[in-house]
Image (cartoon, rainbow, N blue to C red):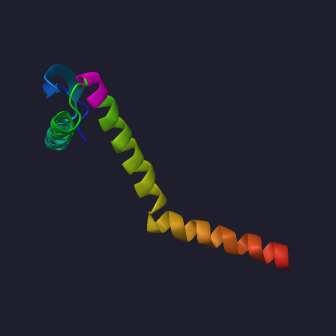
Amino acid sequence: MSDELIPISLWIAGRSYRIRINPEEEAAIKKAVKVADDKIAEMRTHYAGKDDQDFIAMCLLMYALDSVTNAMNDPVIIDEIEGLCNKIDKVITD
């Protein structure tokens, strides 16, 4: 990974943001911005009368929920939780 950060400009919900990133992350960041901007545009068509701040907040909530939900369904985490439950059950029954 490069220590040299590069500046890029991103557009989300019609607003420009200038950030500094690792060059290796540029494609992923631009793809993520496109996904987020597309989701905001989709919400505009479904929820008329709201402003961009509302759409951005709803998008953030959806991504946060996805993150939490996906983490809870991670097989490694599930295995670890099951292992801990088995240890607790063993201690209780012994």
Above or below, 7 against 68 in this view is above
**Residue at 24% over, 22% down:** 51
Q: Quadrant of the C terminus?
A: bottom right
The secondary structure making up most of the magenta span is: helix
Judge by depth and name the residue closer to the eye, 94 or 40: 40
Q: Classify residue 37 by image quadrant.
A: top left
Residue range corresponding to the magenta coloring: 51-55
Above or below, 35 against 14 in this view is below
Does the magenta run of residues contain 53?
yes
- Left/right placement of residue 41 relative to residue 64 reads left
Q: x, y (%) of residue 74?
A: 44, 63
Q: x, y (%) of residue 85?
A: 68, 70
Q: Classify residue 28 by image quadrant.
A: top left
Above or below, 6 against 60 in this view is above
**Residue at 51% over, 63% down:** 77
Q: Classify residue 23 by image quadrant.
A: top left
Q: x, y (%) of residue 75?
A: 45, 68
Does the magenta run of residues contain 61?
no
**Residue at 22% over, 34% down:** 22
Q: Quadrant of the N terminus?
A: top left
